[in-house]
């Protein structure tokens, strides 16, 4: 409890203060899908639209200058947040998915050839799988996966089995959105570089909770989304090392990404404009900058420690429920290196979707399904799971509500109990 953040910061988040059903206050435990935003972020977006909005990098008028300044300030805030060497290594995108597709199309099509290998992990989100499958289809490259233990930890001691001079790319998530595993990012990037492969870190689930330092990580690319770290939806970041981005052809073509356009050809703009075709997410980037300020002021170490306290409480409470299977590595203390603040589970009954529906009736929002990790669910031999994911504004009391409600749900579905099986009028 020493690590818990003050629950008064919930007051920053207007959305949290509501009953989602009569007499059922919202217990929002679906943060890995998308977080909520504090007033500070909402205000920054409102301020942009009410006072400073015009298209960026174009008009020579006051509003366009103000808008451009605010947009570029957001880029420098992101640079600082990532500890990137240069601001022009920060590309604003539509989100994690857009960032990965940009790398797959731009870097991938220019550098990957038949027989080359793309090394992924069994715990990737579909957005860090499908773009590489598409690249493999276009080029004849081969997809490989790192070995992983049954409790969902990558086996680095067996990495040599799959990481060779044929490996062109190592793409992996920093934190699993299903298992909650925190992966050894630095070690993986170092091993990738040692065989001449490029590394891409999917930071969608780590950037909101753990300190990101791209230079210390030694990664070539890193991507994340604004909407998972208290920022707006529709904006995200692609970080790329300058030397790589400079050699890469642009992906999307259009306005802003050009230096000069002729009748039948063009020359590309310098970084970062080369990768920001069209009108960018202006208010989105400004809102993202405000979100990074907000998180930095609280401190990501404190946020991670807070969530770790919550996940330990959830893990020990949930594991008492009959017929439950908790997924991923068990949290083993506040300095546990490989467990992030979410927990996924399956019950012998009822089905994950019924669980989510029953919890919703008590105001508890969780995610049910495969969480865009179908191959991982296949490997675990399950079709679906239920996930509770925590953020800085969640409280131990909310975790206790989840544990109690889930215990009652399981009880209700007891086959030999006096209550009729299948009744879901909780
Ligand atoms: N990777 C991971 C690990 C994720 O959790 C998510 C979002 N669920 C994504 C990628 C995709 O992010 P987005 O939908 O914002 O593009």
Image: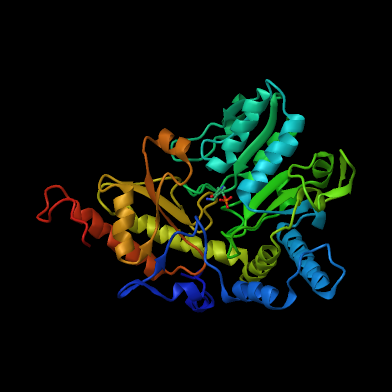
Residue 199 x %, y %: 69, 39
Viewer-nearest residue: 215 or 423: 423
Give me the residue at 71% from left, 34% from top.
Answer: 108
Residue 199 appears in view: no
Give me the residue at 59% from left, 62% from top.
Answer: 229
Residue 326 x %, y %: 37, 47
Give me the residue at 49% from left, 55% from top.
Answer: 33
| Residue located farthest toward the left when viewing the structure as drawn | 418
The quarter in which the C terminus is drawn is bottom left
Residue 175 vs 280, above or below: the answer is above
Viewer-nearest residue: 339 or 282: 282
Quarter-of-image position of residue 383: top left
| Residue located farthest toward the front when viewing the structure as drawn | 263
Residue 192 appears in view: yes
In the rendered view, does 205 fall on the left or right side of 256? left
Residue 275 x %, y %: 77, 48
In the rendered view, does 212 fall on the left or right side of 68? left
In the rendered view, does 315 fall on the left or right side of 321? right
């Amino acid at each position: 409890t020493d690590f818990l953040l003050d629950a008064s910061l919930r007051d920053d988040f207007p959305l949290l203060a509501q009953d989602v059903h009569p007499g059922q206050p919202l217990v929002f435990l679906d943060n890995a899908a998308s977080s909520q935003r504090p007033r500070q972020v909402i205000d920054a977006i409102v301020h942009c639209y009410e006072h400073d909005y015009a298209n960026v990098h174009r008009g020579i008028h006051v509003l366009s200058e103000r808008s451009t300044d605010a947009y570029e300030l957001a880029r420098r805030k992101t640079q600082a947040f990532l500890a990137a060497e240069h601001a022009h290594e920060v590309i604003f995108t539509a989100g994690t998915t857009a960032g990965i597709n940009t790398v797959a199309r731009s870097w991938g099509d220019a550098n990957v050839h038949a027989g080359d290998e793309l090394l992924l992990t069994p715990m990737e989100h579909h957005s860090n799988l499908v773009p590489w499958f598409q690249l493999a289809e276009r080029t004849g490259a081969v997809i490989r996966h790192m070995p992983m233990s049954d409790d969902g930890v990558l086996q680095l001691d067996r990495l040599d089995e799959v990481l060779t001079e044929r490996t062109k790319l190592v793409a992996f998530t920093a934190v699993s959105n299903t298992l909650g595993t925190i992966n050894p990012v630095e070690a993986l990037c170092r091993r990738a570089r040692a065989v001449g492969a490029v590394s891409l870190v999917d930071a969608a689930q780590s950037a909101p909770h753990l300190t990101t330092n791209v230079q210390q990580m030694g990664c070539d690319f890193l991507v994340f989304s604004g909407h998972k770290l208290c920022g707006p939806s529709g904006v995200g970041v692609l970080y790329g090392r300058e030397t790589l981005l400079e050699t890469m052809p642009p992906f999307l073509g259009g306005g802003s990404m050009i230096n000069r356009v002729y009748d039948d050809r063009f020359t590309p703009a310098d970084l970062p404009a080369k990768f920001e075709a069209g009108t960018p997410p202006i208010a989105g980037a400004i809102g993202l900058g405000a979100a990074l300020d907000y998180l930095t002021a609280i401190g990501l170490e404190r946020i991670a420690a807070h969530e770790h306290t919550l996940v330990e409480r959830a893990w020990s409470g949930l594991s008492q429920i009959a017929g439950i299977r908790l997924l991923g590595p068990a949290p083993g203390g506040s300095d546990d290196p490989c467990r992030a603040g979410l927990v996924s589970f399956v019950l012998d009954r009822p089905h994950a979707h019924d669980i989510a529906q029953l919890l919703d009736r008590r105001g508890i929002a969780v995610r049910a399904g495969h969480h865009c990790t179908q191959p991982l669910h296949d490997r675990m031999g399950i079709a679906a799971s239920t996930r509770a994911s925590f953020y800085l504004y969640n409280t131990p009391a909310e975790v206790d509500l989840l544990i109690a409600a889930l215990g009652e749900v399981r009880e209700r579905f007891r086959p030999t109990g006096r209550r009729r099986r299948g009744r879901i009028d909780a």
